[in-house]
Each structure stands twice: as C-alpha cells, then as structure tokens.
Image: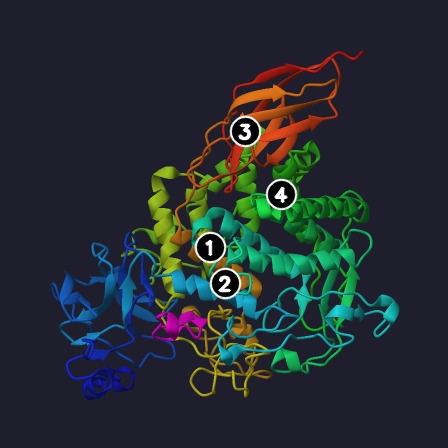
C-alpha cells in the first residue's frame, strides 16, 4: 500500500483541540480507493461504494487489495465507530480492468441504510476507511447554494462585498470606467461616441470576462428548466443582495442576465440583439475590477436575435407565475415576439442565416452559430412562444421544422442539445399540438434506452462502467462535466415526461450515479467543483482556469495561495483531446485525463479546468432535479365558469382555479379551439373585442409550472348583446 495516500488519525492533536475525551471517532486511516459521493446521499438513493485497484494511468502503481471475504465491508458512524451496515464486495465483471478508467474494482451496496447521519466506509480486513459522507434529506442543500452562487460571482458591473460574499472573494464592480460596459463602442468604430451603448450587467461567460448572447442560450434555458422542474429546492435565502424579496434567488440571478439581454436588444434599435461584448486582447487582469481595458461589442446578428427570442419567451413562461413579476413578464413576451418578428425579416423567413458576424477581434470565443444551430434556436423560440400565447404561427413553425432539428433528426437523443430535448417533449404535451407530432416526439424518445441509459447501466455489476456512470470515450472532450450532467438529465427526462414509466426508478438511479461521479465517485477521487471543503468535500478542485482566480494570484489555489478560488465552480473535466504541453495528459485512460491546475499557454489548462455558465447550468439542473421529485401530475380542470357585465363587445369571465400538487401558474382560455389568452393569472378576465350578437363557447385549462395542462373545464356558452 502506498502510504503517501494513507492518512493516520492524529488522536493527540484532536484531543488537545477538542478537549479530553472529545475527539471524534474518525477512521484510523483513510485511503483514496474507497469511492463515495463525498457530500453523501439522499435516504432513498441507491448507495454503492466503488472500491478500486488502479491498473493503468497516472496512479497505476498505487495497488490496493481490499478485503473480499464475506462481511468484510462495513458502514460505520463517524461519531462513534458503531457498525450500522455490513456487506460483501461484489467484483465488477469478474475482476476485469475497466479500460476507460484504468482500474479494476468492486461494488459495495449499502442502499438499505437510510438513517440520517454521518458515516464512512470501513474495510475490516485492511483496517482502512473512506472519507466522511452524510445521509440525509438536506445533504445537497449547501452544494446547490454554492453552485447557484457561482453566477453571483460571475456578475459584472456589480460589486461583490460583505455580507454577500466571504471577504476572500470580494471585489469592486468591474468595467465601470468610461469606454467600458456602460459606454461600450462598436468593434467596427472603436472609441466612437456615436456608437456608445450601455451594455452593462450580465454574467462573465466562463473563465474570461466577455459576455455572449449566443453562448448564454443554453445556460439560461437550462436554469429556467431547473426551476420549472424542481421549484421547491430553489429558496430565497442563498445570500445574494436580492435574498428575501419573495422571488427564488435563482430567478433573481437569471434576471441579472435577462436585464443584460434586454440592453443588448435595446442597443440595436431594431428589436434584434447584439452578439457579444468584450475586450480585444489577451492581457487578462485580476481581479476584474482592476481591468481598465476598453470594451467593444459586435452588432446585431441573426444568431443573437433568435437566441434572444428563445430566452425571452422561455423566461416569460416562468416569471408570469409571480404576481410581483407581471410587468416584467409581459415585457419579456413583448421582446420575444419582437425579436421573432425581426428574425423573420433578417433570415428571410428562417431560410438564410448570418454565420460570420464574429471576426475574432473580440477575444476569445467565436460567438457565431451555424445555420443548423440557428434553425434550432428558432424552434426553441417557437416552442416557448406557443406555450406563452397559443398562436398558430409558432405551432406551425415547430411542426414544419421539428424533424430537422437535433436530436430528432439524428434519431439519437444523446447528452447534447439538452434544452431542445426538454422543449420538444414539453411541446408534445401542449394543447393544440398535432397528435402525430406529439406521438412522433414521444415515440422516438422512448426508443433511447441504448443511448447512455439502461443498456449500459445493466444493474451495475456487469454494466459498461465500473463507476456505474457510462459515457463513451468520445464524450471525454471539452466540457465533459457538462456532457456528464446532461447524461443524467436525459435519463430524468423519461421520468419527467412519463415515457417508459415502468423503468422510471431505474432512469433516476442512472442520473444519480452521474451526480455521484461528479461528487468524487470517480477515478480521480475529486469533486468536480472548486473549493468545496466547507460543504463537506474531502477532495475538491483546488484550482480552475479563470481570469479572476488566475495562476500566481492570491486566488490561485486552495493549497498554495492565500485565498483560492470561490466555491462551487464546475470545471470542464477530463479531456482526451487536450492539446497543451503537459506530457501524457491526453493519453491517460479517458476518465483520468485531468489535472488540477490553472497555468496558461503553452500548458493550456483552459481546455480542462475552465468553468463556464453553461457547464454550471447543466450541473445545477441535474442536482436540483435529483433533490426534488419529478412533477408528473397535471392540474385538475378549472370549474364554475360564469360571465357577467355582458355588452355588445365585452364580458367579464370568472372561474374557480384548477388545483395542482405543486401549483397552478396560469389558465388558458379557449373559444371553441381558438386560444383567446394563454397563462392567465388569477380567476377572472375581461374579454374585449368580441362581436355583437354572437355566441361564444368558452373553456379553460389550468397549467402548472412544469408545463402540464389540465383537461378542459365544463364549457360555458355566452351570447353578447344585440348589435343595435
């Protein structure tokens, strides 16, 4: 056994620190080869420790021979060493080496343990244990809080100060100088006052401080979906300035980005959106508030306009459910429809797209989107706008194009295009959607068990992956941890949309294991989030590639610098396509193709350890949906429709609201099959613009946050007053 990885109990030191007799009964020695979710498990989760003996890769020399006899593995309480569960290791594939990790291993299933508490795994034959983990209903709450707060740390034009941040990560507002975000000028007329625009707010995109409309699309949509699918886990107490205002902090954080997107639309004067804002060189400065470089923007582009329409439309559907946000929600819808109308013109009816708006002068990401991606943005926008308004134009656009967008066009619903997958499946359940379209979407999804799902999981012991969270070798590239998060999400989508319901529990189990992989049950033994010791991680990322937390600064590393990076940032992850100068990294077994460092060129750590808002959003959604319960229950139908104050061209309609296990967010009003109003709040509505001496047969359907719609209410037939 390699003793450099073995930690002995410092009993005397603990006694001196805590007082005689007060030392915690921690394991006498811990080793890194007993892999668990370092934060812990919800009580109902399957709980499987992965015990490994490395065979290939950077740690191949670290041999470990576990106790494989009957009952030689235990779960012990952290506080007093009491054994609460005993089991026997089960070999993975009869002792074969898992090529993707370079490890061979065993599984120890302790799912029967559901009692809340702090524990560790103990190998009674080798007298070594794992790190501490917890079982409990709130075990992931501090993790979610830090993961969401990442977006607060990414805010620009906003001072991060106490009490909203730890003093280690405070910074004044960035890019507030003349010629920066509040008066940025065009890349094509740098410094020209005539082109100056207020483009303040929003989030830094990733490790760089630029802001991109197109890159924001997946982040915004996945965060909105995270809230729609698990609203109860997003509280109003995450410690940001808006906490306590009655709106969940996640939605406050999204408003910071949406307000920036509003400015990117206002700046154009056409209802289109500018493409991006940033600097024109690589001379990064830490902290961001010290950066005096001028900021420039790229003007309107069809890709940004379509992304804006999708984000504004989807945001409207969420914010209209809050009475306090009614005006803002109405503004979002107006902006979405205006952007849609502008895009119809600039794309010649969604047939010709601008794909070379970004010349690379503003560093560094290329914000252009190819024609296929822009068509997909138009479908995302149409789905959101159809849900918001019920207008036939949007439904017809989806019906004309859904078979051309990924994943449907590929017949492969893999761990990409996650916002589109949710949007298509949600659209399939909306009123008025063609039965054949809805059936096609749901049927194709139902055939996806062979795509990073049941076929590979296969119960675990004989499954494709020793670590019980299979992804193909090709998925270990830039942004792997986002891909992994999405792999969990595409399994949860079966459950959320009631597809292959007999396997719902197994789909959730697969998603859980991807989360556990991200939480340290992986060959690296690393939680893929930065600086998470305070949330319970034994070994989390000490360094990330980020302008603020750069190499050589006081924020460089949790191990070697004064402060380290802020908590909760999800890094890109293992990457076998790495092109930097660190020898051997790309040739590691795919799951080990990672290094915890943040050095720039020529080592190019950004290819592995850089975070991004879209990586983060996928992880936040996975965590939130596993913390919550999928809402598969549609609301009950509204009732007691009555009409009053009937005139020649108006009336007031009242009703009793539908009921829902989570909550009704609005009602859709129909006259026959024609939608008169979508997402109506409250229990009354004045109808105007009616025809005189005309009968209207009115029905209502209730809608919940997840997008599920009730059956129609009993019909009410009302005739307007005579035309005289």
Q: Name the foreground residue: 717 vs 77.
A: 717
For disc 4, the marked residue is 384
Q: Position of residue 513 (x, y in %)?
A: 36, 58
Mark 4 or mark 2, whichever is nearer to me = 2
Q: Would you say residue 433 is visible in this rendering?
A: no
- Answer yes or no: do the residues labelled 4 and 3 have beta carbons within 8 Å? no
Q: Position of residue 518 (x, y in %)?
A: 41, 65
How far apart are the alpha carbons under marks 4 and 2?
24 Å
In the rendered structure, which disc, 4 or 1, sits on the residue that comes first in sequence?
1
For disc 1, the marked residue is 234
For disc 2, the marked residue is 148
Q: Name the foreground residue: 14 vs 343.
A: 14
Residue interval drawn in magenta:
525-539
For disc 3, the marked residue is 701
Q: Position of residue 183 (x, y in %)?
A: 78, 70
How far apart are the alpha carbons under marks 4 and 3?
18 Å
In the rendered structure, which disc, 2 or 1, sits on the residue that comes first in sequence?
2
């Amino acid at each position: 056994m390699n003793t450099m990885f073995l930690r002995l109990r410092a009993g005397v030191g603990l006694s001196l620190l805590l007082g005689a007799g007060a030392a915690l009964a921690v394991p006498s020695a811990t080793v890194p080869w007993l892999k668990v979710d370092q934060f812990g498990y919800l009580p109902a989760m399957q709980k499987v420790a992965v015990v490994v003996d490395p065979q290939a890769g950077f740690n191949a020399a670290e041999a470990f021979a576990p106790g494989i006899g009957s009952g030689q593995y235990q779960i012990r309480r952290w506080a007093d060493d009491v054994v609460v569960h005993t089991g026997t290791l089960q070999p993975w594939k009869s002792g074969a080496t898992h090529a993707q990790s370079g490890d061979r291993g065993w599984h120890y299933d302790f799912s029967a343990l559901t009692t809340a508490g702090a524990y560790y795994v103990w190998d009674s034959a080798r007298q070594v244990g794992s790190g501490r983990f917890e079982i409990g209903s709130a075990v992931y709450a501090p993790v979610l809080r830090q993961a969401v707060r990442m977006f607060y740390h990414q805010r620009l034009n906003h001072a991060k100060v106490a009490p909203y941040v730890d003093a280690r990560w405070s910074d004044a507002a960035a890019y507030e100088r003349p010629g920066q975000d509040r008066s940025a000028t065009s890349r094509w007329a740098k410094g020209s006052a005539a082109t100056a625009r207020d483009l303040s707010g929003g989030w830094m995109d990733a490790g760089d401080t630029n802001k991109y409309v197109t890159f924001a699309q997946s982040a915004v949509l996945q965060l909105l979906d995270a809230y729609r699918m698990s609203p109860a886990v997003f509280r109003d107490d995450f410690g940001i300035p808006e906490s306590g205002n009655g709106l969940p902090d996640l939605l406050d954080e999204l408003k910071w980005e949406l307000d920036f997107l509003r400015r990117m639309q206002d700046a154009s004067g056409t209802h289109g959106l500018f493409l991006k804002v940033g600097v024109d060189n690589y001379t990064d400065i830490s902290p961001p508030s010290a950066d005096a470089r001028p900021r420039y923007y790229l003007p309107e582009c069809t890709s940004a306009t379509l992304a804006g329409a999708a984000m504004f439309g989807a945001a409207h559907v969420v914010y209209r459910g809050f009475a306090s946000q009614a005006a803002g929600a109405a503004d979002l819808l107006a902006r979405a429809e205006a952007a849609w109308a502008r895009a119809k013109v600039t794309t010649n009816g969604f047939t010709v797209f601008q794909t070379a708006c970004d010349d690379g002068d503003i560093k560094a990401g290329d914000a252009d989107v190819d024609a296929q991606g822009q068509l997909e943005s138009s479908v995302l926008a149409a789905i959101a706008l159809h849900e918001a308004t019920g207008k036939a134009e949007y439904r017809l656009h989806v019906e004309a194009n859904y078979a051309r967008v990924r994943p449907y066009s590929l017949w492969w619903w893999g761990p990409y295009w996650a916002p589109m997958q949710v949007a298509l499946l949600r659209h399939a359940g909306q009123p008025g959607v063609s039965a054949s379209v809805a059936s096609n979407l749901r049927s194709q999804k139902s055939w996806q068990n062979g795509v990073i799902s049941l076929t590979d999981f296969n119960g675990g012991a004989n499954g494709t992956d020793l670590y019980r969270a299979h992804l193909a070798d090709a998925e270990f590239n830039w942004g792997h941890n986002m891909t992994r998060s999405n792999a969990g999400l595409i399994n949860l989508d079966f459950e959320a949309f009631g597809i292959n319901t007999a396997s719902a529990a197994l789909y959730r189990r697969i998603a859980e294991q991807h989360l556990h992989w991200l939480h340290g049950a992986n060959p690296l033994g690393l939680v893929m989030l930065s600086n998470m010791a305070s949330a319970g991680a034994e070994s989390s990322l000490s360094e990330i590639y980020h302008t603020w937390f750069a190499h050589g600064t006081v924020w460089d590393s949790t191990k070697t610098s004064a402060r380290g990076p802020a908590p909760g940032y999800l890094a890109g992850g293992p990457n076998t396509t790495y092109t930097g100068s660190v020898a051997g990294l790309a040739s590691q077994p795919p799951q080990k193709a990672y290094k915890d460092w943040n050095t720039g060129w020529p080592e190019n750590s950004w290819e592995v350890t850089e975070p991004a808002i879209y990586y983060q959003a996928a992880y936040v959604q996975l965590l939130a949906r596993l913390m919550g319960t999928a809402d598969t229950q549609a609301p009950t139908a509204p009732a007691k429709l009555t009409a009053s104050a009937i005139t020649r061209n108006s009336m007031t309609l009242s009703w009793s609201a539908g009921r829902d296990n989570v909550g009704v967010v609005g009602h859709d009003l129909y006259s026959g099959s024609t939608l008169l109003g979508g997402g109506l709040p409250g229990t009354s509505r004045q109808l105007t613009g009616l025809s005189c001496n005309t009968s209207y047969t009115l029905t209502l359907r209730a809608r919940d946050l997840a997008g599920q719609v009730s059956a129609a209410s009993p019909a009410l037939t009302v005739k307007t007053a005579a035309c005289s």
